[in-house]
Image (cartoon, rainbow, N blue to C red):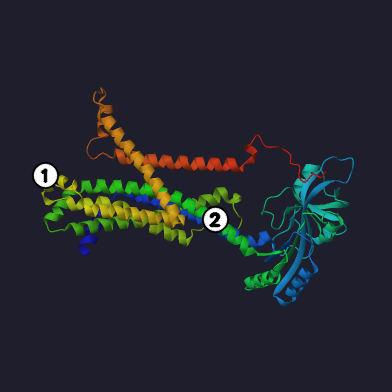
Amino acid sequence: MKFIFQMARREMRSSWRRLLFFFLCIGIGVGSIVALRSTIQNINRAMASEARTLLTADVQIDSTREWKPETRAIIERAAQTLPIRARTETIESNTMVRPADLAREGALMVELKGIEPPYPLYGEFKLADGRQFDHSLLSNNGAVVAPLLLERLQLKVGDKIKIGESTFEIRGQFEREPGGGSGFRLGPRVFIERGAVEATGLVGFGSRARRRILLQVQEGVLETVVQSLRNELKGQLVTVNSYRDSQENLSEQFSRTENYLSLTGLIVLVLGGVGVSSVTRVFIEQKKKTIAVLKCIGGTGRKIISAYLAQVITLGFLGSILGIVLAKGALLLVKSYLAESLPPNMSFELSLGAVAQGLGLGLLISILFAALPLLRIRHIKPNMLLRDDAGNDVRRRFDLTRWVTALMMTLGLLLVASWQAGSIRVGLFFLAGLGVAAAALYVTAILIVRLVSRVRHIRSFAVRQAVNSLYRPGNQTRVIIMAVGLGVFVVMAIQSLQTNLLNEIDITRRTNLPNMFLIDIQS
């Protein structure tokens, strides 16, 4: 073991410039994976912490019908027996708003929400002038509206609007509302008193009003309260949800995003692995005489391979450390330039799980892609010092060890891809697709080399030497074409996917969509 470590240390000290590319390949690949995973995990944690604020409660009891007396009795009994700290009710409905002044034209669909104290149980309700919301603003038919309503109907605070059969005075506009970032909306939000919603005549039989009872419970008993309410209200046509339900849905979506982006980072690392394989092969070729000398003085092939493997592991570890440093720099750039577009409570620290994965992947990819080139050491004989072509005939024979190593390398890549994708099936499809693309590019590179080798008569000396170098012994043409081709393939695939997703989501790019929707028009 002492010989192995001493040799690895001396080789690294004398050949560090040649191995710098090895170091950088692993660093960039690991950095991309750690940065992507840390960013998505930080966003996930930030959004999960906001789940309670988005729901504006710990527990929500939801119904699209009027509360039945027996349903209310169950809820009242639960409120007395369960550890519930606070309770409030809301009612929501989509409706039309128009100016009360007949001289003003215009109407706008809005989301009407009736509330009562102590709403909101969680979250910030802030007015445009910086004040906190006060329920006194809604008393005696007052309303607090979104700024968009004032803009669309050309109104101002103090004007009156007509909702159903009632008239309301606009007493403020809000800048931030509790749960304002959740869900699709048909129009701007308008807040009035819950009792006033009933007076508008919009929530009678056949309406689409949604009634909610919001509960704040003591810490540590959330699951008990939810399960108890679900058992008591079974068959009552109501749903009972907690903020953790929405948190789990968010976490699932972010996990899928994280796995997808991790596969993207894995492609970068695999491309780095191709570079690692190329660097290792060239390095072994350059060290053939040194290896032959070592074998002359008693060094076995196993010991020499172990020494170079120790060198590969050391470089892989150091490259992974570099990748972690690069990932931290990437997060600082995200904080500097994209912080306004991200959740305000988001952390920009590296995730320990992502760091551990990055270190593990850096070492695995280093070992997997360096394994086959290192096996060439077995065929370097002491007579290499006398004849350069010694051992070439041995390499043409069937090599069981080499095939077993290639199989283990493929299985290792499959496990790594499945680990990053969170699914063996996805990992298998990913590796198969990557293999098909790499094989197609490699075959294309072979054809290009054969085509170039037929080009003989070129007058320019520089061009002739450049062309000849593409197919001379020891060339890297096939590997370089495959690596560059895979890189371009990945960039174009991600760009195409991004463009297609944006085209599907961004409705403003569609010119054939209507600019007005008429909903629920009665005869």
Percent position (x, y) of residue 58? 67, 66
Label 2 and label 1: CA atoms lie apart by: 60 Å
Residue 157 image point, x, y percent: 83, 49
Name the foreground residue: 85 vs 81: 81
Which one is closest to the eye, mark 2 or mark 1?
2
**Residue shown at 85%/55% (left/top)?**
142
Residue type indicated by callout 2? Phe
Can you identify the residue that label 2 sits on?
254
- Specify whether residue 519 is in view: yes
Quarter of the image with the N terminus in it: bottom left
Vertical order, 298 against 164 (above or below): below
188 relative to 508, above or below? below
Quarter of image, res 7: bottom left
Marks 2 and 1, the one that precedes in the sequence: 2
In the picture, measured across the screen, residue 269 lies left or right of residue 446, that is right
User: In the image, residue 278 lies at what x, y percent?
Assistant: 29, 46
| Front-most of residues 55 and 172 | 55
Q: Tell me, yes or no, if residue 18 can be seen here.
A: no
* Residue at mark 1: 387
Which residue type carries mark 1?
Answer: Arg
Classify mark 1: residues with Cα within 10 Å, few (<14), some (14-19) or many (20+).
few
Residue at position x 37%, y 43% from top?
A: 436
- Is 424 in front, or is 215? 424
